[in-house]
Each structure stands twice: as C-alpha cells, then as structure tokens.
Image: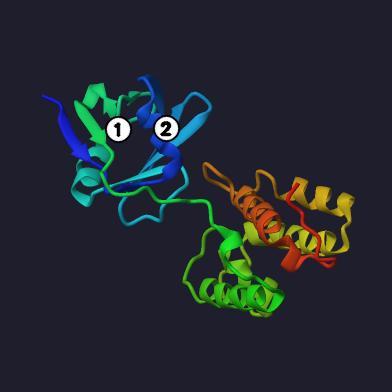
Amino acid sequence: MTSSQVAADYSRPIQLMFAQKPRIGTIHSVFRKAVNITLGDTMLALLCNDLPRMPNGVRLPPVVAKELLPQLRPGMEVWIGNERLLIPTRNFSLHLPGTPAWEPRPDIGAYRWNRETVAQHVRLLAHYLANRHQQEGLAPLVGPLLLGQRKPGQETPLARMALPKLRMLELASWRQDIAGVEEATRGLAGLGPGLTPSGDDALAGFTSIMALLSPQLSADGASRGR
C-alpha cells in the first residue's frame, strides 16, 4: 500500500511540475536533510522542514522527512505529475498542501529603495553572518570584506583562494572593468566543495543583487539587469 503524505509547504515554480501530466524523474543526490530530483532540465529539492525554503523546493513535515529521506538513493525513479510526486520503489506519494505557495521572487518594485536603505541592510546582514559560528563555505569572509574584521578559522585554503577574487570582483564591478569581472569570475566559478560550489553560490548572489538593486549600488546609478 502506498503511503500518501502532504508536504509542509512548497515554492510557486514547482506547481507546474505537479499540475502537468506525469513525467519520470531521477533522484540525483541524497543528503541528510535534502534530496535533489532531476526532471528534464529542472531540479526539484525535497527538504526537511527546518531547512530554508528554496526556489524549486518542497519542504516535508518532520516525521515524513525522518522516515523517507534515509530510504532514498541516487538513481531511484520518481514520477511527478497529476498533482503528486510518486516514488514507486518506496511506495511513497506526496501531495501539495492547500495553502498558498511560497513566492521566491522578491517584489523589489514594491519598496522604495535608496542607497542608504541598501547600505543599512548590507551592514545588518554582514554583522549577522560575521557573528555566526560557521566554518564552511565563504560566509565567514563577510567580516574581512565588509567589516574589516577577522575571526579564527577564516584562513582556510578555500578562504585564501576566494578572498582575492572576491575583492577583484567588487572593485572591477565598481569600475565597470569587464576584463576584471571576467577574471574574477573565472577564479570563483567551481571553487569549493558541494553540489553547488561556494564560488558559484557567491557569483549567483552577486549577479542577483546587481540585477535587482544595481541602481542603488552602481557608481553611475544605472541598471545592470542584463
């Protein structure tokens, strides 16, 4: 008998996957609290409820995640469509809840942004990240980059490789130095461990912020949306 469960919440972009006719996907990778599923050229993430939401994500209730995730393995077949996600080898079926979907795309136009507001939020975020006891990835470098602070554990091999390229990206983008931006990007792309390396995460965040808030961040106030 198939166990039918309801997700805790979900992001708006994955609604179409569940609404369409059933398609076959494959479990790509399995982690302790997350599973990535490939469906064509799209990736869907099944997440524990205590993890942050993701743009293409479905979060599972704690009991469901605890029972299901340890049973999953890369390569397993997954069917998605007709309003459910089905893992046949585990007799598991997941449906979306009736609550509204989470919208991952911020409505930037709804706010009155200016340089002072953006700078204030940057400082708050920098202090938050600098004070977290996190040794992995590039988050600990927020202190040296924005606050002029250093904490024990920042001089990791990853930090030593990334920090010069991050500084180069910051300066080159401010000067509109395309060659410098390209050099910094080549140095950061693929840098670090993980399914999405830390350097890729940094570049994705950089391009997103420049596309959304570049008039408040750029030297000339022009948009960098393209």
* Residue 21 % position (x, y): 37, 20
Badge 1 crowding class, 10 Å Cα cut-off, few under 14, some 14 to 19, many 20 or more, is some
Q: Which mark is residue 59?
A: none
Gap in angstroms between the C-alphas marked 2 and 1: 24 Å
Image vertical order of residue 53 relative to residue 114, above or below = above
Observer-nearest of 14 and 61: 14
- Kind of residue indicated by mark 2: Leu
- Kind of residue indicated by mark 1: Leu
Observer-nearest of 72 and 210: 210
Q: Secondary structure at mark 1?
A: loop
Q: Which mark is residue 72?
A: 1
- Does residue 219 appear in this view? yes
Residue 183 left/right relative to 94 = right
Mark 2 = which residue?
16
Q: Residue at x 34, y 25 (%)?
A: 81
* Residue 140 % position (x, y): 57, 68
Image vertical order of residue 30 relative to residue 144, above or below = above
Q: Residue at x 32, y 57 (%)?
A: 50
As drawn, the residue found furthest toward the left would be 1
Q: Residue at x 38, y 43 (%)?
A: 31
